[in-house]
Amino acid sequence: MTALLELIGVSKRFPLGRRRMFSKVPPAHVHAVDDVSLGVAPGETVGLVGESGCGKSTLVRLITRLLDVTDGTISFDRREISDVPAKLFARDVDRTHIQMVFQDAGESINPRFTATDAIADPLRRLLRLKGAALQSRVEEAALQCGLPLELLGRFPHQLSGGQRARVGIARAIGTRPRLLVLDEPTAALDVSVQVTVLKLLQQLKVELGLSYIFVSHDLNVVRLLCDRVVVMYLGRIVEQGPAQAVFDAPLHPYTRSLIAAVPRLDGARSDVPRLTGEPRSPVDPDPNACRFHGRCPVGEDRCGTAMPALREFAGERFAACHLAG
Amino acid sequence: MSAAQTSTFAHARYVLGENPVTLIAALLFAGYAAMAVLGPAIAPYDPLASDTMRALQAPTWAHVFGTDQLGRDILSRVIVAARVDLGIALASVVLVFAAGGLAGLAAGFFGGWVDAVVGRIADTIMAFPLFVLAMGIVAALGNTIPNIVLATAIINFPLYARVARAETMTRREAGFVDAARLSGHRDGALLVLQVLPNIMPIMVVQMSLTMGYAILNAAGLSFIGLGVRPPTAEWGIMVAEGAGFIVSGEWWIALFPGATLMLAVFCFNLLGDGLRDIADPRRRT
């Protein structure tokens, strides 16, 4: 099985400020994404979880080629796409194949565009469709997303949250992409609407043969929808593996705490210690210490002197912890 | 397309009906536009024909606004002057909209050195008393109409650049900008096709407001003798010529062109508010 999307050693570092004139000290860097390797197989849904500031959004922007990588390579369908500058990727052949559904559908639709304009925009720019062909593709995408055609003439502010989300999805699937990045697609929606949107996404995946990268804070949704899950902490992958296995028996202490923090209806509290405090600073972190060191409930001295590598465990699972297994 | 246009017209009618002040401004604007377009055709007399026998006549039915010191009909001169004054103002506003708007758009979007260059140019212009700067430009380049247009555009540049920059900056990080990139827009197309339509309402308001200011500026330059030259009919010159006669009781020479000028500025200011309501789709119901 060859991966549709493959990331090898991908890093993104942002300089903090500019290098001062005459200064010999290079500026500090925020290590937003650090040495991330992962693959997405055709038809697979990979969940990406982690707390705010763990580098999920940066990783998403790297994968969707809105940002350039600092190190590492991103390949799509065995073609290296990370060497195409982000500025030029707008005209790249694979632009049609990697699309994205944004977190806040209302904000991601140009307020001056009607639903038709929004859905037609990528078709016009990327596929060069015009006239009747364009119109029929727009309507097809709208119907696939359960968007009534009579709403197509409306502006985003005239649509409900759920309708806006459907416009956002219709826009993303219009060019018939192969990989769809879903950046918390339901975070801005009412709970009642979340379910229908998630069902729609699940249905589209089967109908159109899509692969998903699903970014979410909602671990219950990730457990339900995702084949595999990738857990990030401070820019690095700390654990990845089949979703069911990871949720049932997390290997990394961070994953354990994350899963234990999911509220449960029966009110039962798990005995896993709650995490306190904040993650360490992402600015030039110590390369010889585990990123979780200091906040980790089970850490030892060696965690502060050696960065744990991502090791393979039984059942196609990986975890970056000295103490795992 | 035609459906969209119809809805814009319907919306414009709704806005005008809702807001009588805008309606008044629109009617005034129509009047000024007619004066500017038809000009000499609707003026009752030749604006340049002097007749010393009829000099300094107070308003009568024959000469509704009276006559000036050379016996020229003031009403005719006021009407014919509209084309000169509004033409200068419109040309300068269009020029500064294109130059200042695009500079501000680029500055707000790209930041970095583009922002620094545009920002410093705007600061340099703002460091001068603006009317004095306009006087200096016209005096240095020679008082021709293109130079008045240029001077008026230059002194308005910081206003446009800053408004466009600020409005662009608030939208640079918006989700629809990323979405447009995913839709295959590169920076240039993104700026013009996606960001510009979003800042247009505020820019249109800005244009209407500065239109009034540009008229004042053009008339002001002429008033002090640095703009259009006599005997051309122009509101600023007419006020300047009439000013000396107010003391001796011939008030109409300065009053009518002055009032016309004031109403024009007033009209464009009010129109700015109305246009914003029409241009902003969020106001549509």
Image (spheres, grey):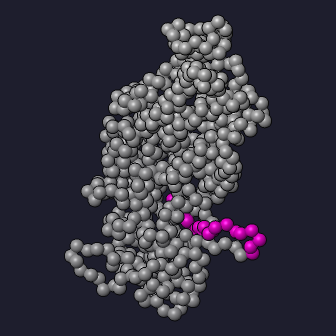
Residue A18 visible in image: yes
Q: Is residue B261 magenta?
A: no
Q: Quadrant of residue A142?
A: top left
Residue placed most toward the observer, A236 or B37: B37
Over which residues does the magenta segment extend?
A1-24
Q: Residue at x 70, y 69 (%)?
A: A19
Question: Residue A131, image x and y in percent?
Answer: 47, 30
Q: Is residue B51 above or below residue A62?
A: above
Q: Residue at x 74, y 37 (%)?
A: B137
User: In the orientation shown, which residue stands out farthest toward the bottom?
Assistant: A301
Q: Is residue A262 above or below residue A92?
A: below
Residue placed most toward the observer, B118 or B80: B80
Q: Is residue A61 above or below residue B193?
A: below
Residue placed most toward the observer, A53 or A291: A53
Residue placed most toward the observer, A35 or B238: B238
Q: Residue at x 55, y 61 (%)?
A: A62
Left or right: where does residue B273 sit relative to residue A271? right
Q: Is residue A206 above or below residue B94?
A: below
Question: Residue A52, image x and y in percent?
Answer: 44, 69
